Image (cartoon, coloured by chain):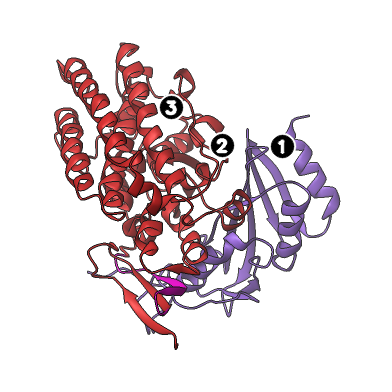
Amino acid sequence: MSVMRVSWGPQHPASGQMRIILDVDGDMVVNAIPSVGYTHRCIEKLAENRRYYQIVPLVERVCNLDAFNATLGYIQAVEELMGLTIPERAQHIRVMMAEMGRIMSHLYWLAIYGIMPGFLTMIMWPIGDRELFLDLAEMVTGCRVTYPYFMIGGVRADLPAGFAERATKTLNFFENRLKDYERMMYKNKIYEMRAKGIGVLKAADAINLGVVGPNLRGSGIKADTRKDEPYQAYDKFDFEIPTEERGDCDARARVRFREIQQSISIIRQALREMPEGPVQVKAPLRPPAGEVYKKIEASRGEMGFYIISDGSDKPCRLKISSPSFRNLAALPFLGRGVTMADIPVIYFSLDLFALDIDR
Amino acid sequence: MSVETGIVEDLKSKFTDAITDASVQRQARIILTAKSEAVINVASYLKENLGFDFVVSVCGAEMPQEDLFTIIYHFWSSSKKILITLKTKVPKKAPKIQSITPVYESANWHERETHEMWGVKFIKHPDLGGLLLPEGWKDLPPQRKEFKLTG
């Protein structure tokens, strides 16, 4: 049989704003070639023409599902360049909101990943429960999806009155919901048949391809920026780095599920041990000349911000090394010699996000 | 002597001519400057002998008042938890450099992006086809400073 070329995306409802060119021989995929760039917004170029504080809402668009972590990464890099020390209360609030961002992003992923092995309920439940966290974010920041809440020098406003009670209530409810998810999908026989042993990425291959984040941890490698290079107040929190050994789609999915549980625990600790004090310091307009590389564990993996400053109020160069771009290399590797039906499961188990790839 | 200083000393003694500058910026950060023809050798030494297993990014940069492009590589060692920034300069006219993809497979996509955005040719790269820009892009590589924003 001859090989046929099929375009999967960029308008396919399942692919996101990217295209995968599939060479198929009958039902078998011979080659999966990612074709990206449909949502390229030149963020790195635009940043060279904006002042440091104007870039904050811009980098948020790098990964708008995970806006808290994206802005935090950039802000940390600028703060290190300026030599600012952030008040402890602001650091705790940042950690708490960043973990909330991780939960929201993982829930969104879980919803879409869930439908690929055939669990239509899984798009209803996590999206519905994500609303609760959006409500919490709205209570703190005033916005639901993108929030320029972190600012250079701290956070924009203190927590509103009654936040801790409401957050605790949400967490209590949500923790019970996680058991439902587990029963619904993770322990389901059909799910196991569709995801276990599919798309196996061995540890050596994962390192070779430069995979990061939950995908790397799903291959059994314990690497997490929150532990490797603790930023903000992460060294004061007690949490684990979940890893799975098998390296298949199910392992990556389980890592993310267990990360949600760890995030809940971190938010609880932050609420319990929230220090008192101011939430911001005054930041200068211009950092001194120099360069900085700062990384952060975003929900899709390690996100790096490299800034070269020439002493003016605009960066000379801002390089964003985004996790999905680095994970993209795993797709052609895993998409070889599998059936067409496995492609969506593999693709979503990697949690590639087109906005994050293109920047 | 800290681990970082040890690495710097090791690299300085191994590449006396090729590495023009090496320093420890702060804890877990090392900045190297190397001659462009030696980058491939430095990269394979970092991978084989010093345990730097990840290429975090490859990017270009353009400093003001300089007639050269800077190409910047970031290497991360997951065992030592140290990040190396390796910089090298290439001329602005027909910039080219040896690709490090044969050594680090993970550099593949980063070099493709740098090729597209800066017009730097990576010699012996397996596939330097278009990545992010629209097909048939005829204008200047957009990350160069001479490409001005409009609108």
Residue in the picture at 41% in, 39% down: A254
> In this image, A211 relative to A135: left or right?
right
Q: Quadrant of residue A52?
A: top left
According to the image, label 3 marks what residue? A232
Question: Badge 2, how many Cα within 10 Å: few under 14, some, many 20+?
Answer: some
Q: Chain of mark 3?
A: A
Which chain identifier belongs to the red chain?
A
Magenta-highlighted residues: A25-39
CA gap between label 1 and label 2 equals 22 Å
CA gap between label 3 and label 2 equals 20 Å
Under mark 3, the amino acid is Gln
According to the image, label 2 marks what residue? A222
Q: Nearer the viewer, residue A63 or B94?
A: A63
Q: Which residue is farthest bottom?
A: A2
Q: Chain of mark 1?
A: B
Q: Is residue A177 above or below residue A28?
A: above
